[in-house]
Amino acid sequence: MDTFNESDFVNHLNTQMRKLEEGEIVTGKVYSINDDSIIVDFGYMKDGVLSKQDALYDMNLNLKDEFNIGDEIACMIMKLNDGEGGVTLSKKEADSITLWEKLEKYKNSKRIIDVVIKDAVKGGLITYIDGYRAFIPQSQLGENRDLSTYPGKTISVNVIEFNKENKKIILSRKEIEGNEREKRRSNAISDFYSSHKPGEVFEGTVVKILSFGALVEIQKDVVGLVHISEISEKNIPKVSDVLSVHDKVKVKILSLDNDSKKISLTIKNAEETPKENYNHLVDSDGMSQNLGSLFKDKFKDFKFEKE
């Protein structure tokens, strides 16, 4: 059983009798929940009263589904006396203050946060962070820019811009996706280097046209460069004259640079050297034939004339 000495009693009384101000943020625990409000115990002589309107951003939600007895929540004091002996609180106002502080930290540290996409609108996607509307421009989505595929999904994003006065929050998926893609590519290339060598021939797909050559994907996330001089024996003024994105091409590995993880490819020398077929020189029993056996039918009736 916990002891409660005189010092503890005095501290408890001081806490309960401390002076509070409207606009102050206090932290308390959910004491009870009904359909329209929550009672919050924040160690004051009066209970805090948190209405549904000040607790939820979506009035279609149920307080009992969103909060539990014992939950610790931060609220702003709106009124010290609600006329019924309680202190009027607002979680939404407290969220508004702490949100911008969090967003500042998230942006500076490039922290990754998960959000649920609520809707697709012209030019991007809508989500919410602590009840505040946030926008993800279509240009910041990475590879998949089909807006209709996102609502209801949870995606990882960075905070790239926000404005407290205008309550504007801009998020991005692009950099995260780029980092994920680069990590996959690095792992794929490491595996490729350990199991392949120069001279091997692959069927690849042109994924990008450059002024000095073409990038060809020869395996998932493994891309090599075909320099313009390695495309054809003929002089080629422009790569785009002979190659297009999505073209299927046969390429041979020229070199693998282990330090830079770059792969050099060739198209013009990609045809494998044909192997001569010497099967006609082998007997049915697998033994090689000698000259005598090769030409025995030719010389069987030949007679040498005497001088």
Image (spheres, rainbow, N blue to C red):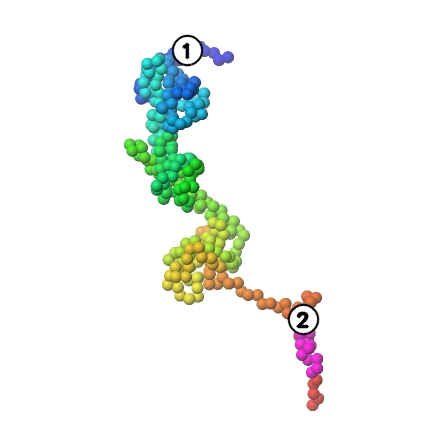
Residue situated in front as seen by the camera: 110 or 167: 167
Amino acid under label 1?
Answer: Phe
Q: Residue furthest left?
A: 165
Which residue corresponds to the image point at 38% horizontal and 30% vertical from the top-left?
A: 130
Circle 1 residues within 10 Å: few <14, some 14–19, many ≥20 = few
Residue 9: which numbered mark, if any?
Answer: 1
Residue designated by label 2: 289
Which residue corresponds to the image point at 53% horizontal and 51% vertical from the top-left?
A: 194
Indicate yes or no whether the magenta region holds residue 20.
no
Q: Residue furthest front?
A: 60
Q: Which residues are magenta?
A: 292-302
Compared with 2, 219 (above or below) is: below
What's the magenta bit mostly, secondary-structure-wise?
Answer: helix
Compared with 29, 307 (above or below) is: below
Circle 2 residues within 10 Å: few <14, some 14–19, many ≥20 = few
| Image x and y of residue 151, in percent | 42, 38
Residue 266: which numbered mark, if any?
Answer: none
| Image x and y of residue 302, in percent | 69, 83
Question: How far apart are the two marked residues, 2 and 1, measured between alpha carbons?
Answer: 111 Å
